[in-house]
Amino acid sequence: MCFSSTFDGIKHRFVDISHLGIEAPFLPATLGLRSQALKLTFVSPEPNALFLKPTLSLEEMKGLVEKRYDANKAETVFHRAFVGDTISLIYSPVYIDDKIYDAVLNKPLSVKPPADFDISTRPAESPDWPIRFIPALCQTCGWDLEGDRESLTLICRNCTSIWQATETGLEALKFGVMPGDNPDAVHLPFWRIKAAVSGIELHTYADLVKHANLPKVITSDMLDTKFYFWVQAFKVRPKIFLRISRKMTLSQPREELITGIPEGRLYPVTLPVQEAVESLKLLLAGFVKPLNHFLPDLPNIQITPKSVRLAFIPFEEGQHEFIQPESLLTINKNMLAISKNL
């Protein structure tokens, strides 16, 4: 999801693109729809194949994407963020005869390459990246872990722990559950993030009331209540992504999170915390008032996460939506990819 903060508000769009990873002006700059339409398989070393090493970094690629969006726009973009992105390295097969040929369509891919073109001088690599499996067993008690197919976390109901996969194995996550009385509630995951924000006082609930111009009278209790960003830990359409996080952040749930796995249904965690952090500036631009005075300072503001906790929030299931009783947040069921466990 690509979000751009402008004077007209936060604009959004869904991005699914590819870009050539090497410097070769005579080759197509993109795969077009091929990466979406054709089936991809895991790369494996082949004795007679040469795998060219990418020379374009991920940051450079994102910069090219931004330039593409800004090429025909006169409006000022104060901040842009890519949230929930999945970046893949795709090798597209070609062979060289008198020209460079597409090995899928067996057709010329470009005009005749330059006379000084020598494929052997290009940096290459051997894609010796074996798939490694991690046993879905709790690292504390050895119990079988549970998890949806798309979930980034695994749950142990025996010792009430939650785990996520890392490069070195499974790692325990700090988490909590907002208490509720309905055993049939659906618990949606959110990232509760405590962060330091430069250039603006945003430490307590009272600071939020002041900067967001909320219709509330500041009380001593608000002065003592810490401020947290609340970002959903599940992917949704760009149109409602910021609406959900903004509503939860403005409501500032103050119930103490309790330990334990709730008996109700759990929605899978599909948005990593690193991606949630990318949206914090957008959230800030979504509630600070007056916006026109704040936006010019937005590029210079730094947000540094200090602590993170995964929180499961209970939602009541209605006919067409899920409803959070305390914040009155509603999420249409059609907006969520309902798993078989729900």
Image: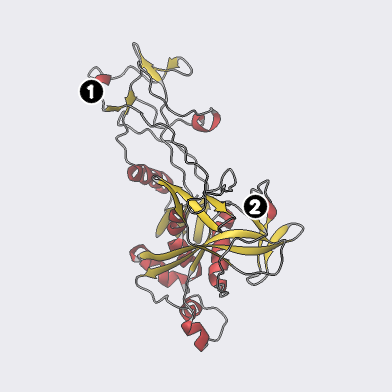
Identify which residue, 190 or 275, lies in the foreground. Answer: 190
Q: Does 94 appear above or below 324?
A: above
Q: Residue 172, percent across and down?
A: 46, 55
Q: Would residue 76 be seen by someone viewing this image from the given angle?
A: no
Q: Tag on residue 121? A: 1
Relative placement, left or right, of 115 versus 268 is left
Q: Does 114 appear above or below 299?
A: above
Q: Does 215 appear above or below 296?
A: below
> Quadrant location of residue 190?
bottom right
Q: Residue 26, percent across and down?
A: 33, 25
Q: Secondary structure at mark 2?
A: helix
Give amino acid for label 1: Thr
Residue located farthest toward the front when viewing the structure as drawn:
141
Give amino acid for label 2: Met
Q: Residue at x 47, y 83 (%)?
A: 224
Lower position in the chain sequence, tag 1 or tag 2: 1
Identify which residue, 43 or 249, lies in the foreground. Answer: 43
Relative placement, left or right, of 202 versus 113 is right
Relative placement, left or right, of 273 versus 232 is left
Identify which residue, 324 or 282, lies in the foreground. Answer: 324
Q: Which residue is mark 2?
A: 335
Q: Residue 294, percent across and down?
A: 41, 70
Residues at marks 1 and 2, CA–CA distance in whole angstroms: 50 Å
Q: Residues within 10 Å of mark 1 (few under 14, many from 20)?
A: few
Residue located farthest toward the bottom when viewing the structure as drawn:
220
Q: Would residue 37 be seen by someone viewing this image from the given angle?
A: yes
Q: Residue at x 55, y 78 (%)?
A: 214
Q: Secondary structure at mark 1?
A: helix
Q: Tag on residue 316? A: none
Q: Residue 189, percent across and down?
A: 57, 59
